[in-house]
Amino acid sequence: MRTPQRLSAAVLVAVAAAAALAGCSSAGSAAAGQAPAPATPKSILVPVFPTTVAAPNGSVTIKREPNRIVSLDPTATEDLYAMGAGTQVVAVDQDSDYPPGVPVTSLSGLTPNLEAIAKYSPSLVIASQNSGGLVTGLGKLGVPVLIEPAVATLSDAYLQIEQIGQATGHYNQATEVVRNMQEEINDTVRQAGTKYRGETYYWELSNDPYYSVTSATFIGHILDLFGLKNIADAADKPADGGYPELSEEYIVTAKPQLIFLADNQAADGGQTPAIVAKRPGWADMPAVQDGNIFGLNDDIASRWGPRLPSLVNEIENALAGAKS
Amino acid sequence: MRSRTRSRAPSRERAALRYPRSVRRLGAFGLAAAFLAAATLVAAFVGAADLNPLATAAALLDKVPFVALPSSMSPLDRAVLFQIRLPRVVLGALVGGLLALAGAGYQGVFRNPLVDSGLLGASAGAGLGATLAIVDLGRAGPGVVPVAAFVGSLAGVAAAYLTGAVASRTMLGDGVATLLLAGIAVGSFLTAVQTLLLQRSAQDIQAVYSWLLGSLSAASWQQVTEILPYAAVSSVVILLHGRHLDVLAVGDEEARALGLRPGLVRLIVIAACALAAASAVAVSGLIGFVGIVVPHVARRLAGPSYPSVLPLSLLIGAGFLVLADTLARTVLSPAELPIGVVTALIGAPAFVWVLRGTRSAST
């Protein structure tokens, strides 16, 4: 999966350079186009710079509309492009791969290299964690950094998109993105109704050892929308942050009716429904006998960006196709 | 080192005065075998799945030849017992026995009580192999990681051995200290490469980290049968060299005078220990402390003679890991603990206790 990315990295850098040039001009016109839009909701007045974002890492002030954005997180990258800030993006980290054509670089969001980031002379950096002294280090260079960590609820996911919108001068588009997401998700959930209420599920993050998620996690909240019951909740304890390592014996005897596989790209060493069904001792589980094992798109299931409605849809489709 | 051998002699004499040596040996073997049997029984009866103990006992006895007992177990519970719990117990016993035996063998070869089964780049090599498999070769299928860890572990030892041999200018590893130091250098190097790989691939950190902490959570009969041949060959070779290790303990010169080729013995035992440790690591990841603590416990039970220490280590190591894994999967049930954490949590205090005992016995 990564190799083709590497191969095309050079091409993408070239594209990035072109995009950056294009970004400089189009960002100006976009700002001009937006400026007169007076229909700004509530207290946040945008796109007026300087603006101060109440980000998870404190107040972040952005003086001018940022036209050289570096995104170090795949979710932030998806957010930016969904709200039309893509032309302002000059570089994204090595794990960002959506939408197609984003300017992928070798930058890492987990072990960021300040000099490598500074080389892009960014006017705004967005990351999901403040590792390697990112905020302080880039702060010395006068570069504002927005830390948007993994969220636990849908409303936090929406809030992040709005914060990124405010920071990039796309607040209106960001609220539009959020509104569409909410509508789409609500539609899906409304259609499902109470059909699946009380069905039990096991969500598999990894299989050696068996890591799962509880209802307290983001994914848990999403499945709560359908009223499903999570077998991992029995193993919940504060220390593991909602990601318990489950005993295989327990998974089998808890008899979940549905199994969801978040790490399901067989090409990546992941587990497909066929592999799961063949695990020793699993054959007598209801979910296996009914064929209710569902592989989900790894990327969509592990990000909290604008493709969330697709995840909810994917889950609904699985539920609709499940035997019970 | 020298003070240790000197202090060992009187305590052995004292023990010999109290009991005949054969009685003490017999007692030690009885104790170790009972420990393993008890650990296995406990492990078979407890787990996150609340299986009915009576039904479990009936189902287990039913497997004994010439015994036919109807068990009320549902097919699901039966699958949990025979496909999930039992292979894990058996695999735990195998891994624990191999790690302890390899540790004891290395301690004999290097005449050093501080070494364990992860020595000479074995753990570091396995870690690099597993990381490589998870990060870069994951695409090739789910069975790749054990093979890569196995090969990595053996390659790590081979690299360390060759480095040591080149550094001490003798192919048969007469420079014991040089060999150990070469192992440290090779180990650090391999760990550095592994960390480098991991830095590149953030999304695999969780998988690699889990592997490094060790786990038997995905144990299966298939894994048991896969490592069994290597386990058998390496164990037999190590066990057959107990007397040679005793002779080595008095020093190379003396051993040579007694007609032994110290370098050759060392090469054979190191190769067998490397194979034992590699097959354990392949299915369990890195589990610390078993290889260093267990041989010391064996020595306390039966004295320092390797023909006793080696088989005792095998038995006690097996029982110890079965017990540790039982704790790992029941303490937080239905959640699990990484087994490496459990072995260190029990192993470290046990080690201190053993050391204290050794001290007081020798003063």
Image (spheres, helix red, strand yellow):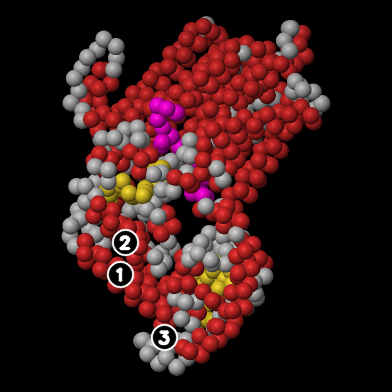
Using a 10 Å C-alpha cutoff, classify the residue at mark 3 as few (fewer than 14 neighbours), some (14 to 19) or many (20 or more). Answer: few
Q: For the residues tagged 2 and 3, is the chain the same?
A: yes
Q: A317 or B177, which is in the foreground? A: A317
Question: Residues under labels 1 and 3: Cα distance?
Answer: 25 Å
User: In the drawing, does residue B234 fall left or right of residue A252?
Assistant: right
Q: Earlier in the sequence, mark 1 or mark 3?
A: 3
Q: Give the numbered dot on residue A312.
A: 2
Question: Residues under labels 2 and 1: Cα distance?
Answer: 9 Å
The residue pinned by badge 3 equals A44
Q: Quadrant of residue B172?
A: top right
Q: Main secondary structure of the magenta part?
A: helix
The residue pinned by badge 1 equals A184
Q: Secondary structure at mark 1?
A: helix
Above or below: residue B247 compared with residue B192: above
Q: For the residues tagged 1 and 3, is the chain the same?
A: yes
Report x, y in % for residue A70: 57, 71
Q: B269 or A9, which is in the foreground? A: A9
Residue type at numbered disc 2: Val
Above or below: residue B155 compared with residue A30: above
